[in-house]
Image (cartoon, rainbow, N blue to C red):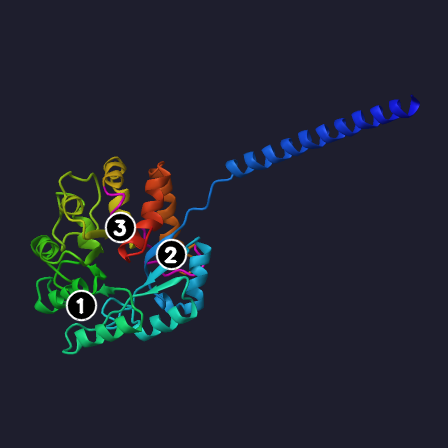
Amino acid sequence: MMSSRIESRSTAAGSLTRRGFLATTGVACAGMLASAEDTPAKDKVFDCHLHINHMRRSIADTVKHMDATGTDRAFILPLETGEGGVLLRTETVLHAFHEYGDRLVPFCQTDIRKGDVLERVRAYHLLGCRGIGEQKEHLPLNDRRVEAVIALCDELNWPITIHFQDGANGFNQGLAEHLETYLKRYRRVRIIGHAQSFWSHISADVPAPEKSLYPTGPVKPGGLIDRLLADYPNLYADMSAGSGFNALSRDEDFTAGFLRRHSKKLLFGSDCPCVDGKGGNFKGVCYSTQLQSFLKRMLPDRESLQDILYNNAARVLGEKA
């Protein structure tokens, strides 16, 4: 009898212990899940516009900039002619790619005024380059040599980043007259628009380039790039540098709708020369952190934000986003 009572008490105690353990474990697991839900997932970031030697920045310093700004991957764009103030060889970009293949995506660029440009681009294709950019020479957009490299990108199923800057000393002048022609003629190439004149056309009211390449004030609806982004699946917009940020921040009411309309066509980019993600060596401004903060404030929809910050750049490369 006594043995039976002891066994009964022992069994009851064991049952209580097991119940207590399971209850405690359940509370702990619930707490861990709640904590995980309260912690926002990190936004993936793909910078579509980065140079290595901006302000003499090294390859390692460029990757430090990416780390400091939470950037997972970046297009590295050479500028072989140096006409835009930066001289960066495609060979240097390929060297960087071999050091940081999981972080850096190599583009190529060479002087399109030279007779062997197409052969050189084909060689870069074989060496692992994924597109052309930054296309930036003092030539009008309708120059046959500009069209030749766009046609080659169409053949290779590549993107090309084009710097549009009207005016006497500009690059690829004549966006308003000639860009749509290329978008109609070449359907596989992804043309990525960048720089002052491209972003000036966010508005239907565009001042002469001699007056301003960085227009301010309210955006007049009906701008050329607003229409072209809607009409042509092969046009994308590079949001980098002062030109992109100026256009997007000048009229936030307009920009809110612009971001919603084109959330699958806009590419986050920085074109930033700083090292530390704080602009310590560049006027106290980091184009990357500045634009990321702006987009997170303007885009409450996380899916659209991730498209702009990462997925669209992957799609431009032909990767599954």
Which of the two discs, 2 and 1, labels the residue nearer the N terminus? Answer: 1
Element marked by disc 1: loop
Is the residue marked by circle 3 packed among few (<14), some (14-19), or many (20+) residues within 10 Å? many
Q: Check residue 244 in the rendering and tell me which mark sits there, or answer none.
A: 3
Give me the residue at 18% from left, 45% from top: 202
Q: Which residue is mark 1?
A: 137
Q: Which residue is mark 2?
A: 283
**Residue type for callout 1:** Glu
Q: Is residue 120 above or below residue 254?
A: below
Is the residue marked by circle 2 packed among few (<14), some (14-19), or many (20+) residues within 10 Å? few
Q: Is residue 26 above or below residue 295?
A: above
**Residue type for callout 3:** Gly
Q: Could you say which quadrant of the image residue 128 lies in?
A: bottom left
Q: Nearer the viewer, residue 242 or 315?
A: 315
Q: Give the extent of the magenta segment.
A: 262-277
Q: Could you say which quadrant of the image residue 221 lies in?
A: top left
